């Protein structure tokens, strides 16, 4: 029995139906597990496409495949189908490489369980899109007979939505495969919308959606050279500025070839940078750079930090992102001021942690920490202070390591395997400074600790949750530091030190570049990074200016052909529109 | 010039700011994290164990079958009615048939005097928590610290009732009601403000209890977290202002407040206190602990328990509610109209535990630094009427003969006739 019908005639998949359903929708996803790990010419294949008559390999080279992040997935779905669509799923863990998840995403595939998650999620989204209450708006056309297949309406929907999901127009093969699915599903279920739902699920499962595939094409202006094709450019820009798939205007610029011209590129970058949606891009970038993914596993000892809760953790994360968007985007402030500005936002939960009144009837309110608070920028917000501490105590070492790694791009090697931590962990003794001095008598540890601990110790007036304190075990806490001969004290001294450290803006430029292109800046990128850093300084260290300058520079879209990949001959026709 | 001192209790370490010109010289603000009737516990452990307060322990569990037999049911009827396994004993209201044990099957919860007073055993010990309300040290209890003249007849009357008995914060009643508050059902904030140099010793102190619409927040240990912010929600009824003084950190009323209303942590919901006083201690850890006391009307106490579904209360807390009615009525010790008037009120004290919190004006624009009335700002809309259906159904529907649903066990005709005539008038 292939089909059961409920009393009201609705299609209700039984086990055999489910098998067939999965066969339809999984057809487009069968290569998913391979897609993330394999670079290959000619695009990522849907098995259904193998039947298409075009046998000639296209003159393009896939230069990178990156799994889209959870936030990119969510933003894309919200953009296409509206914010009311619920995206209820656990996404597969991401991998941090060279300080960024964005770089690690180039090495990610999809596990079997991950595919199950995407499958369930795709089905859930499709079902919501095809909800009778909203499907007329979502689909944009009506079938001649809702009880039968309708190729015209189905094609219209698949083409339109498919382009938004794949971030490029669908090939005829990709469309016809989904049309077949829609037709067979509608016939089986006696319902046009059930068939279209299967097609949409197939699109949502497709590697072309779940992975950002960057493609190079022969550069007509430089024979023998390659350039990023227009759709890959559009995608790179859109995910950098807005953390979502390209909108219609950007795709149109790619289709027309405008995006391959300097003027067209400048116009689109200016538009992206001027949009309020830049907030999403900046939030996504700093969420990655500041390693906020670690909030998902953050835990605190309730006996030591009873005020910690998931609500506090969520609030802290939001506080820092709001602070950054306000300073860097809304006020076009100096990036270096993130270490010194005490203008921020708090809610009721955070006000309790900071021990200040919450003077608002709204969920969030602006707040400026007074000088007496000892706070100084984002290093003294609950995010950094709690995230880089232990569950039951602060950690100058962890704070120092992360400060170097995140803000000056100076990673610290892992500790040797045989370290004796007993002296550091004897938290009932003295202050952490005295315990670390004891610990550093171990020569194998001292080199790294001499670098990490001084800045971390200046933050010791904040406990492992970020609450102000001045004593530990009844002893006054010394927050003085001497870094490279520069003496200062406390968090405010550290904030000033970081503000003035030239490594800080240079590191941001390097990180933004790596975040955008999906690989760490290397030796060959040094001069470019140096030029962009200089331009960043001239702009007054304005982040929107940095993004604009980078996104309009030729180096930003420079193509690196993977080793061993056969490239097209000069006579091959580029697939990307050009002028 | 005196140094302006703001000791907002929530910021013992951090000075937050200065108050406006009209405000007090110092102020501390709190939120109530626990409150319960002040019932001194005289045993060492356990709820039912004998102690100096209740030498025979709590009032024992009720034999409800016998209670029904006393009311005229046959032993078979009584057992059938009390058998929870009987699926048809009451298709709608479970064990609500316990109501109809008054004279002529009257509902004893509505008409408690239609049944006899079995006698609720009260406290016989000499020690009680609370406040000396009448200034007379020759009457009343002695406090646990030796203060004489403690007036708390409410405790004397109900202190051996299982629901009220137990160590502080551990009686079943207190746990139930405070759970409700701590889960966000209501919030009470306290503002203490003085004009002297030393908050611990100040002759002119004002204390205000206000409602807040902001919910309490629990910390990682399940306790109420400190330092949260609460906006005062002006309430036309629930507000209590006291003229007080401090001595060595203990806040005591200078004069009694004629009438105040507080949110009562019980099924009564409302706590009117006449001749009200406070005795609160500012603890070293920043918290505030102590009592607010006065004379409360006793009848709403009884009504509250009845409305909370009398049969269930009787079963779970080992009491016959009409006994509570008789005991409170018998023990009432205050008449608002004077010594010769009807004693409608009973001396009472409530134990209050509060923690540091930020208290804001209703619009959240400023921290509250003085004690003043906000009643004029209260919404003119009548308060939402609480829907309590508990008593509904206890009165038999005259259109449905009692026993109609009792198909399994036929009820004698005389019982049916009597029941369908309920509610009967009370016994005079």
Image (cartoon, coloured by chain):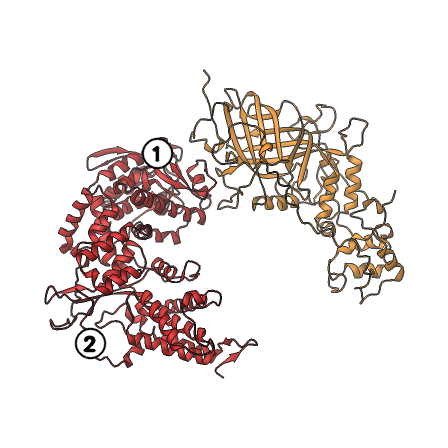
Chain colours: A red, B orange
Q: Is residue A304 visible?
A: no
The numbered mark at residue A57 is 2
Give the residue number, with chain letter if any, for mark 1.
A374
> Which residue appears farthest toward the bottom when viewing the image?
A1
Residue depicted at x 61% and y 27%: B242
Residue placed most toward the observer, B137 or B111: B111
Q: Nearer the viewer, mark 1 or mark 2?
A: 2
Residue B261 image position (x, y, % from top left)? 65, 34
- Label whose residue precedes the other's in the sequence (1 or 2): 2
Residue, far top: B1
Percent position of residue B256, x then y: 66, 25
**Residue at image location 44% in from the left, 80% down from the top:** A187
Q: Secondary structure at mark 1?
A: loop
- Which is nearer the eye, A564 or A436? A564
Of all residues shown, which one is farthest toward the left?
A223
| Quadrant (top left, top right, bottom left, bottom right) of the N terminus of chain B | top left
Q: Is residue B174 left or right of residue A413?
A: right
Q: Is residue A400 left or right of residue B105?
A: left
Of all chains, the one bearing label 2 is: A
Query: Where residue A446 appears, x then y in whole percent?
Result: 24, 44
Specify the farthest residue to the right: B414
Q: Quadrant of residue A370?
A: top left
* Subunit of label 1: A
Relative to the observer, which residue lies in front, B285 or A355?
A355
| Res B147 seen here | yes
Left or right: A554 in relation to B115? left
**Residue at left 53%, top 30%?**
B283
- Whether label 1 touches label 2, CB < 8 Å: no
A143 up-or-down from B403: above or below: below
Are there few (<14), some (14-19), or many (20+) residues within 10 Å of tag 2?
few
Q: Are marks 1 and 2 on the same chain?
A: yes
């Amino acid at each position: 029995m292939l089909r059961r019908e409920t009393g009201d005639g609705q299609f209700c998949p039984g086990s055999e139906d489910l098998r067939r359903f999965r066969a339809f929708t999984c057809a487009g996803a069968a290569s998913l597990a391979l897609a993330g790990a394999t670079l290959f010419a000619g695009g990522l294949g849907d098995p259904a496409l193998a039947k298409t008559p075009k046998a000639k390999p296209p003159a393009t080279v896939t230069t990178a495949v990156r799994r889209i992040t959870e936030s990119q997935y969510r933003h894309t779905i919200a953009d296409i189908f509206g914010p009311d669509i619920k995206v209820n799923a656990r996404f597969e863990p991401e991998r941090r490489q060279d300080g960024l998840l964005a770089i690690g995403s180039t090495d990610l595939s999809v596990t079997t369980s991950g595919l199950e998650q995407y499958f369930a999620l795709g089905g859930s989204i499709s079902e919501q899109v095809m909800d009778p209450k909203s499907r007329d708006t979502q689909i944009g056309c009506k079938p001649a007979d809702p009880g039968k297949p309708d190729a015209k309406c189905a094609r219209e929907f698949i083409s339109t939505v498919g382009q938004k999901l794949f971030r490029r127009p669908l090939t005829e093969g990709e469309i016809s495969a989904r049309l077949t699915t829609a037709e067979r599903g509608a016939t089986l279920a006696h319902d046009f919308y059930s068939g279209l739902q299967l097609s949409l699920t197939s699109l949502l499962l497709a590697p072309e959606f779940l992975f950002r595939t960057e493609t190079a094409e022969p550069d007509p202006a430089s024979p023998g050279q390659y350039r990023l094709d227009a759709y890959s450019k559009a995608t790179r820009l859109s995910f950098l500025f807005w953390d979502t798939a390209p909108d219609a205007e950007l795709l149109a610029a790619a289709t027309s070839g405008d995006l391959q011209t300097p003027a067209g590129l400048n116009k689109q970058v200016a538009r992206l940078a001027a949009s309020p949606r830049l907030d999403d891009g900046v939030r996504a970038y700093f969420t990655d750079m500041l390693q906020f993914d670690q909030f998902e596993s953050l835990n605190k000892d309730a006996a030591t930090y009873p005020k910690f809760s998931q609500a506090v953790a969520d609030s802290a994360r939001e506080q820092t992102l709001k602070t950054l968007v306000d300073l860097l985007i809304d006020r076009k402030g100096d990036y270096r001021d993130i270490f010194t500005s005490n203008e921020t936002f708090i809610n009721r939960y955070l006000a309790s942690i900071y021990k200040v009144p919450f003077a608002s009837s709204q969920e969030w309110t602006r707040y400026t920490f007074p000088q007496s608070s000892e706070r100084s920028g984002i290093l003294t917000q609950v995010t950094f202070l709690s995230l880089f501490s232990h569950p039951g105590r602060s950690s100058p070492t962890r704070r120092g390591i992360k400060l170097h790694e995140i803000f000056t791009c100076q990673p610290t090697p892992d500790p040797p395997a045989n370290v004796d931590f007993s002296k550091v962990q004897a938290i009932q003794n003295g202050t952490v400074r005295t315990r670390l001095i004891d610990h550093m008598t171990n020569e194998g540890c001292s080199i790294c600790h001499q670098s990490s601990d001084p800045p971390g110790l200046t933050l010791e007036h904040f406990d492992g949750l970020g609450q102000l304190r001045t004593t530990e075990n009844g002893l006054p806490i010394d927050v003085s530091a001497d870094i490279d001969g520069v003496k200062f004290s406390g968090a405010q001294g550290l904030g000033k030190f970081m503000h003035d450290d030239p490594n800080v803006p240079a590191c941001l430029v390097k990180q933004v570049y790596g975040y955008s292109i999906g690989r760490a800046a290397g030796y060959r990128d040094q001069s470019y990074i140096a030029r962009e850093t200089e331009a960043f300084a001239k702009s007054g260290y304005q982040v929107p200016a940095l993004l604009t300058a980078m996104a309009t520079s030729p180096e930003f879209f420079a193509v690196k052909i993977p080793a061993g990949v056969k490239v097209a001959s000069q006579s091959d026709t580029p697939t990307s529109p050009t002028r | 010039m005196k140094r302006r001192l703001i000791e907002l209790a929530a910021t013992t370490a951090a000075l937050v700011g200065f108050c406006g010109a009209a405000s007090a010289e110092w102020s501390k603000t709190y939120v109530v994290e626990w409150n319960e009737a002040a019932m001194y516990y005289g045993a060492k452990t356990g709820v039912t164990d004998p102690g100096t307060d209740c030498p025979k322990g709590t009032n024992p569990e009720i034999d409800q079958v016998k209670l029904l037999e006393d009311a005229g049911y046959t032993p078979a009827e009584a057992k059938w009615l009390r058998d929870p396994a009987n699926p048809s004993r009451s298709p709608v209201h479970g064990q609500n048939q316990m109501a109809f044990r008054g004279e002529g099957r009257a509902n004893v919860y509505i008409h408690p005097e239609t049944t006899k007073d079995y006698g609720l055993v009260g406290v016989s010990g000499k020690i009680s928590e609370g406040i000396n309300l009448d200034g007379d040290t020759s009457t009343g209890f002695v406090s646990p610290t030796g203060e004489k003249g403690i007036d708390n007849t409410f405790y004397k009357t109900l202190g051996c009732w299982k629901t009220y008995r137990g160590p502080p914060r551990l009686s079943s009643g207190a746990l139930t009601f405070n759970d409700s508050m701590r889960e966000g059902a209501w919030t009470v904030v306290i503002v203490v403000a003085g004009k002297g140099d030393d908050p611990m010793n100040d002759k002119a102190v004002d204390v205000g209890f206000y409602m807040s619409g902001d919910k309490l927040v629990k910390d990682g240990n399940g306790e109420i977290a400190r330092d949260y912010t609460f906006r005062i929600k002006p309430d036309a009824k629930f507000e209590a202002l006291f003229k007080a003084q401090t001595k060595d950190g203990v806040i005591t009323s200078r004069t009694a407040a004629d009438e105040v209303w507080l949110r009562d942590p019980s099924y009564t919901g409302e706590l009117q206190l006449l001749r009200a006083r406070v005795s609160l201690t500012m603890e070293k850890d920043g918290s505030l602990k102590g009592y607010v006391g006065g004379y409360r009307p006793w009848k709403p106490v009884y009504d509250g328990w009845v409305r909370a579904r009398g049969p269930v209360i009787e079963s779970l807390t080992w009491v016959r509610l009409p006994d509570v009615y008789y005991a409170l009525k018998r023990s009432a010790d205050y008449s608002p109209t004077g010594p010769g008037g009807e004693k409608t009120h009973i001396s009472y004290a409530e134990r209050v535990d509060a923690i540091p919190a930020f208290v804001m004006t209703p619009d959240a624009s400023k921290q509250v630094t003085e004690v003043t009335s906000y009643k004029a700002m209260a919404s003119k809309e009548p308060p939402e009427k609480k829907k309590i259906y508990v008593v509904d159904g206890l009165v038999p529907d005259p259109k449905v003969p009692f026993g109609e649903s009792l198909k399994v066990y036929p009820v004698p005709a005389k019982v049916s006739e009597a029941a369908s005539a309920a509610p009967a008038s009370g016994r005079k």
